[in-house]
Image (cartoon, rainbow, N blue to C red):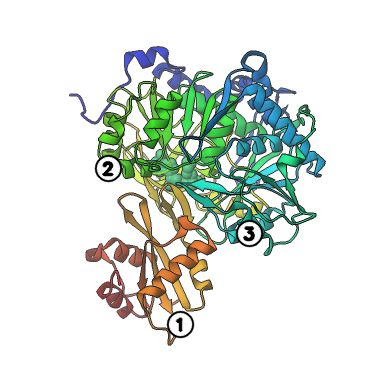
Amino acid sequence: MTDPDLYPVSAAWAERAHMDAAAYDAARIAARDTPDAFWAEQAKRLDWITAPTIIKDVSFHKDDFRIRWFADGVLNVCFNCVDRHLPERADQTAIVWEGDDPAQSGQLTYAELHREVCRMANVLKALGVGKGDRVTIYLPMIPAAAVAMLACARIGAVHSVVFGGFSPDSIAGRIEDCGSRFVITADEGLRAGKRIPLKANVDAALEKVAGVETVLIISHTHADVPMIAGRDVRYGEAKHGVSDDCPCEPMGAEDPLFILYTSGSTGKPKGVLHTTGGYLFWVSYTHELVFDYRPGEVFWCTADVGWVTGHSYVVYGALANAATTLMFEGVPNYPDNRRFWQVVDKHKVEIFYTAPTALRALMRDGDEPVKASSRASLRLLGTVGEPINPEAWRWYHEVVGEGRLPIIDTWWQTETGGALIAPLPGATDLKPGSATKPLPGVELELVDAEGGVLDGAASGNLCITDSWPGQMRTVWGDHQRFFDTYFSTYPGKYFTGDGCRRDKDGYYWITGRVDDVINVSGHRMGTAEVESALVLHDVVAEAAVVGFPHDIKGQGIYAYVTLNAGVEPHDDLKAALVAHVRKEIGPIAAPDSIQWAPGLPKTRSGKIMRRILRKIAENDLGSLGDTSTLADPSVVDDLVRNRGS
Ligand code: WT7
């Protein structure tokens, strides 16, 4: 019997792909049984100054906890992403840029990218940036963002890219946490025709945090921004007469490459640290396998470089594989909802990789905006960031891909560096809504709440029992937090924070976070962060935040707010609180719904029972569960009665 929900690999794909089903099985076995030999061979895809002899050196156990890959290897990431392509591909386009305004686009060849990166690296050096220094990058989606990242990598500086949608407070927190003395920003960004005051945001951030010596400003919109003497440097002036030759710093495989802040279930965002050898290897390896990538193909990942997806697949994985990578400054519905497909046709995009939230929003507008384009250049479609509902999967497959393109659903995390669960187009039959199977070297396990291992078809918490080269190495400045967050819940295993089902065919279906992290439009948000922002407002006594299902965003943000005594609840105050959260964290953290809560459901020991709050937010009122352990069960009745108010 054929399963209507199974989309088998076509003969043509099995034939042309880097990996067919037999090769996939062989690689999985080799990675598991003879990891040193397997990964040493695979690591030859990078250019090493000194090839590694120590390959895998890993333990997830408390007493000998360590994660090191290719530890004695020496290489430079920028060399691998740029210089090594010059002999054969100097004139190939490395970066295609499509502006927010459809009239603005441009490109850089590998030779031009090399010159630009060397110049910026020399400017950074002249400003005093050295190996190991942290550089905060707060830029729009323009080639200079990739150039800045690569320039840091070239000289061994550690970048911390902060998404352009984050607030001055968020920037300040990240600068402070990693102690960066240098910031690279632009005058302004553009988004759907609106100007984003990047330089002004940096100025505001630097009023709250000390230690930044230099701000390098890239001119993008040519807005007239105030300059602070002695601190601010215009890049356009600084790069005058600077040499376009800059040697690559030899780096140990385990030297830091970048820090990227991501939300957790508690406290402030944590600085996820990725290192040089393992990370670059993993993003290059997975970019080739998962997208079945060939050098020179036009690859478009729509993510912003402020997120890990942008780091790994707009910049590092793509450029390491000699791609033509597309950077898009705009949004899917500006000037109108045909934009994605117009850009595909304009730049002859072959591989397109986006988030389910964007697809759901576009799907709502029907098929016409898609059909107004040819999309003939496309040969593969990908998704990332959140579970894709089968309905959106089918729309992507049938309407965008006209039934002829594989849909590659990639599951991974900021922490994992690159994709871990994903179909390979020449090897894996597809099932709509499933990220399918683990890549070679990825050993998954489902466990129950007590840590009992579940076999066969089952649902549980998703763990990974062994290391892969792209794994994060530490939380910047807090190695204990790294261990505690990921390795202490189920000793000896990395706990992903995701719930997951495995079906009878061994396919994995991610069901979403099981911790206090919510996924809003594919962006990760800690409920604790939103709560801290809310209670900073002087009318708020207490706040509890949960996720709830949202048609477009996947999850929306639902906030229960207890006002200080004497403060009258009214709708203007809700608007003020939403504005306050936008200002504190950024627009992505803005609550979709605020409910006034005279009291919150707490246990006698004072712990908020989020399970109940989630049910009320979901309007799942029939199954609130046992409320008898609450200090005051009547608060639940009140919240139910006043749901949504
Ligand atoms: C969380 C990680 C992967 C880079 C972008 C997000 C969810 C991610 C999928 C997918 C189902 C997914 C998980 C994960 N997630 N991709 N294909 N199917 N869920 O990185 O911000 O670190 O978030 O995103 O819940 O834990 P991130």
- Sequence-first disc among 3 and 1: 3
Label 1: which secondary element = loop
* Residue position for label 1: 564
Residue 602, visible in the rendered structure: no
* Residue position for label 2: 365
Residue located 45% across and 58% down the image: 516
Depth check, front residue: 352 or 243: 243
* Residue position for label 3: 173
Q: Crowdedness of circle 1 by 10 Å Cα count: few (<14), some, many (20+)?
A: some
Ligand 1 within 8 Å of disc 1? The answer is: no
Residue 522, labelled with which disc? none
Label 3: which secondary element = helix
- Sequence-first disc among 1 and 2: 2
User: In the image, is residue 641 above or below residue 360?
Assistant: below
State the image quarter where residue 37 is shown.
top right
Q: CA distance from mark 1 to mark 2?
A: 43 Å
In the rendering, at what x and y percent does residue 549 appear? 32, 54
- Sequence-first disc among 3 and 2: 3
Q: Crowdedness of circle 3 by 10 Å Cα count: few (<14), some, many (20+)?
A: some
Tell me the amino acid under the disc marked 1.
Asn
Task: Report the quarter where the N terminus lies.
Answer: top left
Q: CA distance from mark 3 to mark 2?
A: 39 Å
Residue 30, visible in the rendered structure: yes
Q: Nearer the viewer, mark 1 or mark 2?
A: 2
Ligand 1 within 8 Å of disc 3? The answer is: no
State the image quarter where residue 268 is shown.
bottom right
